[in-house]
Amino acid sequence: MHEVTFLCPKDLQDAVRLYRTTPGCRPLAGGTDLMVMLHARTLRPQPRAVLDIWSLAELKGVRRHSGMLEIGAAESYTGIIRSREAHRHVPALVAAARTIGAAQIQNRGTLGGNLANASPAGDTLPILLAYDAVVVTDRRSIPIDQFFTGYRKTALQPDELITAVRFPQGRDVVFRKVGTRAAQAISKVMMAVSRKPARIAIGSVAEVPLRARGAEAALERGDVDGAIAAVADDIRPIDDVRSTADYRRTVTQNVLRELLSVG
Ligand SMILES: Cc1cc2nc3c(=O)[nH]c(=O)nc-3n(C[C@H](O)[C@H](O)[C@H](O)COP(=O)(O)OP(=O)(O)OC[C@H]3O[C@@H](n4cnc5c(N)ncnc54)[C@H](O)[C@@H]3O)c2cc1C
């Protein structure tokens, strides 16, 4: 059994320094993904140190920043659900946060963890794509549509820490999560849509959470039927334990039709 060193930085600056200087180090926010992976020994390479960023004040909170809404990377889903600013400016994110796991996971799971984990089934990720969110790190800002680079791969450097996520204000986003049950379900299809500008973002239908560019172009022209037809070609679903590719394709078109009739 190999030993893992537990690092407790005193502030963000200390965390950034430790992350850059400790080989084989992984940040630990809520731990709802990381602890599962550590326990199952599925991480390659196995981390030699974990950096506990959960309590860092700089990574908490929901606030306005330069005309945008900013949510700290280590803010929990419960914190987002309880935030008045989040309700006012990113209600779709609040509603999506309510569908994640159950209370225990909402109390510990964070936006930064969902992003860095980069699962194609991560529920906040299509929402972030539909809002054109910006991922802020200890060294730069990354537009969300440049963040996911492959299956569970991101644009982050190995020692780069997500510090916050920023959202432009004044956008209407609607979403629908399709799972096996109403609670504790990993999404079979997760879709978030904005009409203006046209954004159609979908999870669990490709190796990354993706923007359906063909469908967006049709929607931009006001061609709703064209968008519903095009979305089937935008996605790259697979058969897996949760669903078949054919099912996901049909559901994706049905969900888009439904969201465009209310959105
Ligand atoms: C029972 C259960 C139910 C779940 N249900 C859902 C669900 O319905 N929908 C869903 O989307 N997810 C679900 N999850 C997955 C998980 O809860 C989320 O992905 C959560 O957002 C992860 O956040 P965390 O803070 O716990 O991440 P952690 O486990 O702390 O970290 C996850 C990964 O991100 C890295 N990381 C964390 N923070 C940062 C940062 N600031 N900068 C750089 N890297 C960072 C870590 O090193 C690790 O690799 C579930 C998990 C469990 C165990």
Image (cartoon, grey):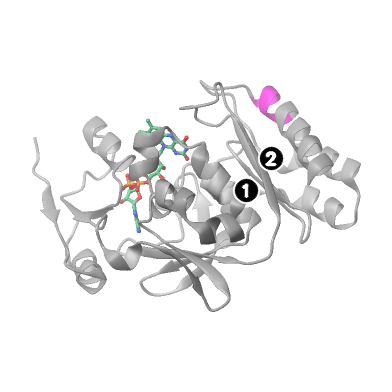
Residue at the image position 83 percent from the left and 45 percent from the top:
227
What secondary structure is marked by label 2?
loop
Residue at the image position 21 percent from the left and 69 percent from the top:
11
Q: How far apart are marks 2 and 1 (CA)?
A: 8 Å
Marks 2/1 in contact by CB < 8 Å: the verdict is yes
Q: Can the viewer see residue 240?
A: yes
Instruction: Specify whether tag 1 is near ligand 1 (CB below 8 Å).
Output: no
What secondary structure is marked by label 1?
strand
Name the residue type under label 2.
Ile
Work out whether 230 lies above or below 251. below
Q: Specify the segment rendered in magenta.
A: 245-249
Quadrant holding ligand 1? top left
Mark 2 and mark 1 lie on one chain; the one further toward the N terminus is 1
Which labelled disc corresponds to residue 235? 2
Q: Which of 146 and 219 is in front in this view?
A: 219
Residue at the image position 51 percent from the left and 54 percent from the top:
149
| Residue of label 1 | 210
Counting from the top left corner in percent of width and height, residue 246 is at 70, 24
Q: Nearer the viewer, residue 110 or 103?
A: 103
Q: Can the viewer see residue 160?
A: no
Residue that protrudes farthest toward the bottom in the picture: 66
Residue at the image position 75 percent from the left and 27 percent from the top:
250
Work out whether 121 lies above or below 241. below
Work out whether 238 lies above or below 126. above
